[in-house]
Image: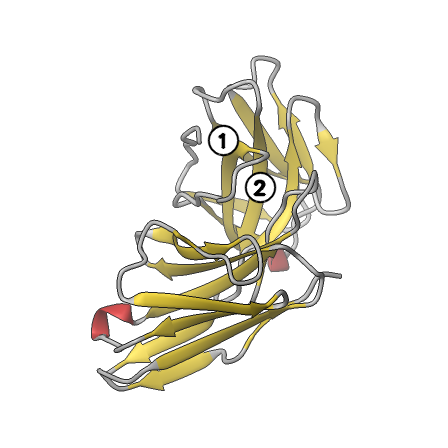
Amino acid sequence: DAKTTQPPSMDCAEGRAANLPCNHSTISGNEYVYWYRQIHSQGPQYIIHGLKNNETNEMASLIITEDRKSSTLILPHATLRDTAVYYCIVRYNYGQNFVFGPGTRLSVLP
Amino acid sequence: DVKVTQSSRYLVKRTGEKVFLECVQDMDHENMFWYRQDPGLGLRLIYFSYDVKMKEKGDIPEGYSVSREKKERFSLILESASTNQTSMYLCASRAQGIYYEQYFGPGTRLTVT
């Protein structure tokens, strides 16, 4: 699976959009980009995934660059409950395992 | 909604004890996984199972075994608990097919004294 690089931490004001970047410059053509988050002392929670098109669901939007070497997870109106560690993962969709890196610790500030 | 439950949120055991961690999922998923999570090391895969009675070693299987007698239940066994197995243990499940996200349980924080 391709390696990802994320900033270790970010802050965001409550009510503003949180934009979390992820670099995956060695991604191959059939690898998907997944985002999970982990709120303190809970199991990771699936957010969204995509291959090359931008995706949106009730939680977030995923913007993937045209060359697929980076992506951005957007939480449109961050709340205090969005404070968590956010993980960007790239993997084959037929692989068995997800490999979680250190992620980005997002702090939403009042 | 998919639900993955784990038998305990917190567990304290003594060195040398045999420890059972239970995981149950209610969505008829074929694949189930056991991870441990430690500060600075992220999530590491211990074992996974892709069918009843089938199991595969993950990245760190030493000191652990697993059992999958029923599709919905995946057990992690520490044969003789040691202090270096103090950790957060996370169970996950995932369906076979095109919809590939994993669903995680709430975790069990195990302390071995």
Judging by the rendered image, the residue that carries numbered circle 1 is A22
Nearer to me, A64 or B76: B76
- Note whether B41 is above or below A73 in the view shown: below
Q: Which mark is nearer the camera, 1 or 2?
A: 2
Q: Residues within 10 Å of mark 1 (few under 14, many from 20)?
A: many
Amino acid type, label 2 = Trp
Where does residue B80 sit, x and y in percent of width and height? 26, 78
Q: Residue at image x 46%, y 26%?
A: A23
Judging by the rendered image, the residue that carries numbered circle 2 is A35
Where does residue A62 sit, x and y in percent of width and height? 66, 32
Disc number placed over residue A59 in the picture, else none: none
Whether label 1 touches label 2, CB < 8 Å: yes
The image quadrant where one finds the C terminus of chain B is: bottom left
Amino acid type, label 1 = Cys
Q: Residue furthest front?
A: B53
Q: Tally the marks.
A: 2
Nearer to me, B53 or A95: B53
The image quadrant where one finds the N terminus of chain B is: bottom right
Nearer to me, B105 or B63: B63
